[in-house]
Image: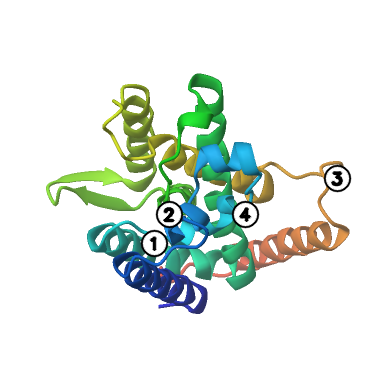
Amino acid sequence: MTLVTRNIIVTCVVVYFIDFVLTHLGIQIQGLYLKEILGLVPALVKENGWVWQFLTYIFLHGHPLHLLLNMLILWYFGSEIEVKLGRKHFLFYFLLCGIGAGLFNYTVNLLFSDVSRLSHPIIGASGAIYGILAAYGIFFGERYFLVFFVFPMKAKYFVLVMAFVELITGVEASSQDNVAHFAHLGGMLIGALYLYFRYLRPKGPGSGQSKRDQDREKLKRQFTLIVNEKNSREEKGPYWN
């Protein structure tokens, strides 16, 4: 397990147990439980300006299974994405997806419902984790998953199916549905857009690519040309794979 992924998991577990103890002891701060202060409560954001909730809600979880599933997915996918992006960029990406997921869900609520009545806290790292799923589909999209341990599917298609499911369930969700589907969808969307502009967008002399990167690409092409030219002059031998 990589460093940042492990620290995020430890933080979520510690915060869960602190919240669990305080809630079961009935300890409140100004009449509010910890979930209502640190969770994302749209009504409190709108009326009181508690914007820190867009960050703190990520590290709260409702029950042990919620925590366990999120942390397992984070461990499974997060470590490899952390190696790909580097520690600092991975932490930034995780928080970006989590905050973006909260903002996206809040905006949807603001447009299509009465936010002042939404007093139930949104909690969990699922939005950020869906962003990590998006990154996995982008960077390792050709890998295969066994969906339900039966159906083989490439990672990129699996991520698209997950996004489609969240969109449909979010649109058709009833008032009894306590899953923030649009937060999941927002995390994937924010993550995919960031990765596109940061890593995937074609870069040229006028696209903002640094001179150092341009020189590096130029040297790489020259080296490849020299090696290919040298190999073409040599006698053919056994192929190594």
Query: What is the distance, in whole Å, between disc 2 and disc 3 at their CAs?
Result: 35 Å
Q: Of helix, strand and loop, which one carries label 1?
A: helix
Residue 62 in percent (x, y) is at 32, 56
Q: Can you tell which mark lies on residue 129?
A: 2
The amino acid sitting under disc 4 is: Trp
User: Are dots 2 and 4 in contact, CB under 8 Å?
Assistant: no
Is residue 63 found left or right of 225 in the rendered image? left
The residue that disc 1 covers is 77
The amino acid sitting under disc 1 is: Phe
Q: Nearer the observer, disc 3 or disc 4? A: 4
Q: Nearer the observer, disc 1 or disc 4? A: 4
Sequence order check, earlier mark of 2 and 1: 1
Q: Nearer the observer, disc 2 or disc 4? A: 4
Image quadrant holding the N terminus, namely bottom left
Which scheme is used to colour this image of the protein? rainbow
Sequence order check, earlier mark of 3 and 4: 4
The residue that disc 3 covers is 205
Is residue 139 found left or right of 166 in the rendered image? right
Query: What is the distance, in whole Å, between disc 3 and disc 4 at their CAs?
Result: 40 Å
User: Are dots 2 and 3 in contact, CB under 8 Å?
Assistant: no
Query: What is the distance, in whole Å, between disc 2 and disc 1 at their CAs?
Result: 9 Å
Asked whether 162 or 26 is in front, the reply is: 26
Question: Who's the residue at 37% across and 23% down the image?
Answer: 171
Is residue 215 found left or right of 138 in the rendered image? right
Q: Residues within 10 Å of mark 4 (few under 14, many from 20)?
A: some
Taking 81 as reference, is 200 above or below it?
above
Asked whether 53 or 145 is in front, the reply is: 53
Sequence order check, earlier mark of 2 and 3: 2
